[in-house]
């Protein structure tokens, strides 16, 4: 053992007891800078609450550093360097793996994966060198860098502060809602340099040593204060904390530490766990109705609800109408001329063909999707039910974008690795719309383009009920786009038996990223929205061909045009599914139905209304309980008085092991929207009437119709997704 340890048994007094106050100061400063960088209102009670958490968590982090340096200071230099290098490099490898970099080597994102691994390793080497410089040893009792001259120390403080500033800016501006592991690493790598900077400053100030005795007592008192104030009965405090990245991270870290049964939820700090001695009881558990136990810690035990899952179809004679349903992936109504004046012929002119067709159509101005992702939105739309009223199957997306069941994962090639879990609707959910129409004698056809993904492939069951199912990605490469989708739809129309009624579903992928350049089409500039508008023009061009051909069928055909979900625009990209903001869930919806004429409808509707509407128009009766309503009454009786309607939309995201990264549900009535984050247990209310309206936090027991409706929805579904293999 002598080979590993120093010969000198006695080591002079170190500065290790400075690490807890230095770490607390560092975390407090980072939270304060983040907080005061915002224009949001702040209450003194909230400031004290988050300060208590920051100081306590910082002290814990500093104590861990103190213990680590105490245990390693007797090691010989080469072994200390090896230990820190291996530890930090291991963390870099974990980060690269968490971001899926290794799984993407040799694939579509090979260069990006290599860059992520390279930056992680470079950062690890820099950090390991920094740690070694502060490591106390027999020769440098306070650390090599700490014992340098005053000028060097203050210069190093400046470098450390500047490095932390750069990392904080990257964390705040680069994909702020994505890549949780990367943002965690950025925060840690920003905290440690600031902590080391405080070590340099505190080591030069003798007066700091007199504060050490009472430091832990102050930490304990402030932490107890935070435990008392951060509760469900103080929603404004939680509201102000979760809005800012650093205070939010501190809160979530404290909750994780206080999660005693390790089920992901804490009974303290408004963490939502009502029994922290039973890991089967927590806000993500599925509530079993009628067993007397509130498994999901929400509104008590759920009452038993019976749903008829078997769809019994009845009808009299052939359908009076054919039906064509056209969906466009990620088409934002704010970029469609019929919805926004700026995008009409005199302006950006993104959708001239759709705008012209809409002149004789019913335009629904407040249409919403039930899901933020295509997999949720299309599944919910084809079943006419909200997502949690359906049953789901686990699929896994691989590096090659294949979708496989768990039983198929052991057959993957060495180069094809699992990236994430994707739920898709299970056959146990009953019959989708095409199967209902098929049972009543209609020919059912689908032409779908999901481009590089398989979210609309037969592999995940989307083809259920279709007599003919055409995939655009099976066409020649130059036709695997909106042009190919339109041409395949036109061929399908010509091949239909004209003696039978039919249902045709066509899905265009165009506006969904990645954006491409199409020759001969207008592009206004290099911005994210300019590139998106260019893609919309390309989709509209080929959509116009299909709509033009459908004119010959309009006498006995109902035609619907919609998007599966909206799109949210940032400075660098456009995304969806990451939140339930208006731009992400509001969709265009237009209809040309014999006898409906042209009309603008401003009442709220949902994509789940398409199933009952189409069943109504085709005179098809089913026994399945649906969540949607027929739009027929809104069109045929536009002046009738109706009760205010509340709609549901939700989004979720899983990692490859099945862990929830995102789980949000919204209930809204056209005036307000309440979003429930099931992971961090917060209810936030937004105004739907004003753009950029400031969100308001609701308490857990707030008397609010939207929250009550959302609660009933969750209780009727058990809360947790019904997910199986």
Image (tube, rainbow, N blue to C red):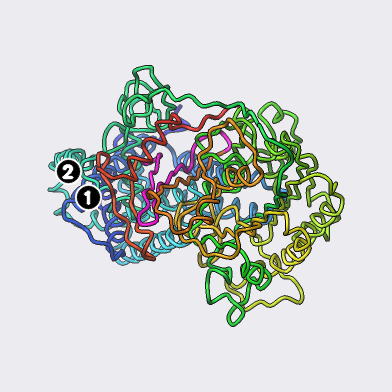
The local secondary structure at tag 2 comes to helix
Query: Can you say which quadrant of the picture contains the C terminus?
Result: top right
- Name the one closer to the observer, 587 or 271: 587
Q: Name the residue under label 1.
A: 51
Q: Which residue lies furthest to the top in this view?
A: 291
Q: Is residue 665 magenta?
A: yes
Circle 1 residues within 10 Å: few <14, some 14–19, many ≥20: many
Residue 499, placed above or below residue 411: below
Residue 584, placed above or below residue 217: below
Give the mark nearer the N terminus: 1 vs 2: 1
- Name the one closer to the observer, 101 or 505: 505
Circle 2 residues within 10 Å: few <14, some 14–19, many ≥20: many
- Residue 1 is situated, as x and y percent measured from the top left of the image, at 46, 27
Q: Main secondary structure of the magenta part?
A: strand
In the figure, residue 296 lies in which quadrant? top left
Instruction: For marks 1 and 2, give the CA distance.
Output: 8 Å
Mark identifier at residue 222: 2
The residue range painted magenta reads: 656-680
Residue 246 seen by the camera: yes
Q: Image check: 409 left or right of 252? A: right
- Residue 442 is situated, as x and y percent measured from the top left of the image, at 75, 41
- Name the one closer to the observer, 301 or 406: 301
The local secondary structure at tag 1 comes to helix
In the figure, residue 252 lies in which quadrant? top left
- Residue 516 is situated, as x and y percent measured from the top left of the image, at 70, 66
Mark identifier at residue 442: none
- Residue 501 is situated, as x and y percent measured from the top left of the image, at 77, 45
């Amino acid at each position: 053992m002598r080979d590993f340890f120093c010969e000198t048994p006695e080591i002079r007094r170190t500065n290790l007891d400075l690490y807890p106050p230095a770490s607390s100061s560092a975390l407090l400063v980072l939270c304060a800078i983040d907080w005061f960088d915002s224009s949001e209102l702040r209450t003194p009670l909230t400031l004290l609450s988050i300060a208590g958490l920051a100081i306590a968590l910082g002290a814990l982090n500093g104590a861990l550093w103190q213990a680590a340096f105490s245990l390693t200071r007797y090691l010989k230099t080469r072994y200390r360097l090896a230990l820190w290098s291996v530890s930090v490099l291991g963390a870099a490898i974990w980060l690269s793996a968490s971001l899926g970099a290794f799984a993407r080597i040799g694939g579509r994102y090979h260069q990006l994966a290599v860059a992520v691994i390279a930056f992680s390793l470079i950062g690890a080497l820099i950090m390991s060198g920094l740690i070694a410089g502060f490591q106390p040893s027999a020769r440098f009792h306070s650390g090599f860098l700490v014992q340098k001259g005053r000028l060097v120390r203050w210069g190093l403080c400046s470098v450390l502060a500047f490095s932390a500033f750069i990392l904080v800016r990257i964390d705040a501006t680069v994909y702020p809602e994505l890549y949780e592991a990367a943002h965690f690493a950025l925060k840690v790598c920003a905290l440690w340099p600031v902590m080391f900077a405080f070590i340099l400053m505190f080591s030069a100030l003798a007066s700091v040593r007199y504060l050490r005795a009472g430091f832990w007592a102050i930490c304990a008192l402030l932490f107890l204060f935070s435990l008392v104030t951060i509760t469900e009965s103080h929603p404004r405090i939680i509201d102000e904390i979760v809005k800012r990245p650093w205070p939010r991270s501190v809160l979530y870290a404290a909750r994780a530490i206080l999660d005693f049964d390790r089920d992901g939820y804490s009974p303290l700090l408004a963490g939502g766990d009502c029994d922290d001695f039973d890991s089967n009881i927590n806000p993500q558990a599925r509530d079993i109705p009628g067993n007397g136990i509130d498994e999901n810690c929400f509104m008590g035990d759920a009452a038993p609800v019976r749903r008829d899952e078997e769809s019994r179809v009845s009808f009299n004679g052939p359908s009076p109408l054919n039906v064509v349903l056209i969906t466009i992936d990620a088409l934002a109504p704010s970029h469609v001329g019929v919805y926004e004046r700026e995008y009409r012929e005199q302006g950006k002119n993104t959708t001239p063909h759709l705008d012209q067709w809409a002149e004789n159509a019913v335009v629904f101005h407040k249409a919403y999707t039930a899901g933020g992702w295509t997999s949720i939105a299309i599944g919910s739309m084809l079943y006419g039910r909200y997502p949690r009223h359906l049953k789901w199957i686990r699929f896994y997306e691989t590096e090659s974008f294949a979708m496989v069941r768990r039983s198929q994962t052991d057959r993957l090639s060495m180069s094809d690795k699992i990236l994430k879990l994707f739920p898709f609707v299970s056959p146990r959910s009953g019959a989708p719309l095409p199967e209902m129409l098929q049972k009543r004698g209609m020919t059912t056809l689908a032409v779908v383009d999901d481009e590089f993904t398989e979210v609309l492939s037969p592999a995940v069951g989307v083809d259920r009920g279709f007599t003919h199912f055409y995939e655009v990605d099976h066409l020649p490469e130059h036709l695997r786009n909106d042009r190919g989708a339109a041409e395949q739809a036109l061929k399908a129309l010509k091949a239909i038996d004209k003696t039978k009624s039919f249902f045709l579903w066509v899905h265009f992928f165009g506006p969904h990223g990645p954006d491409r350049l199409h020759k001969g089409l207008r592009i206004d500039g290099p911005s994210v929205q300019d590139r998106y508008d260019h893609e919309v023009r390309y989709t509209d061009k080929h959509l116009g061909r299909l709509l033009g051909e459908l004119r010959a069928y309009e006498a006995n055909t109902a035609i619907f045009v919609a998007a599966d979900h909206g799109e949210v625009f940032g400075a660098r990209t456009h995304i969806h599914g990451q939140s339930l903001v208006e731009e992400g869930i509001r969709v265009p919806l237009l209809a040309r139905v014999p006898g409906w004429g042209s009309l603008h409808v401003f009442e709220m509707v949902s994509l789940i209304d398409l199933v009952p509407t189409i069943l109504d128009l085709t005179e098809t009766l089913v026994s399945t309980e649906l969540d949607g309503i027929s739009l027929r009454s809104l069109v045929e009786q536009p002046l009738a008085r109706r009760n205010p309607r509340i709609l549901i939309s939700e989004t979720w995201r899983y990692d490859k092991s099945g862990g929830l990264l995102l789980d949000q549900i919204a209930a809204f009535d056209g005036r307000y929207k309440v979003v429930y984050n099931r992971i961090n247990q917060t209810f936030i209310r937004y105004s739907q009437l004003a753009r950029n309206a400031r969100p308001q936090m609701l308490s857990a027991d707030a008397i609010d119709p939207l929250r009550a409706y959302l609660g009933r929805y969750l209780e009727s579904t058990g809360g947790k997704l019904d997910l199986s293999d």
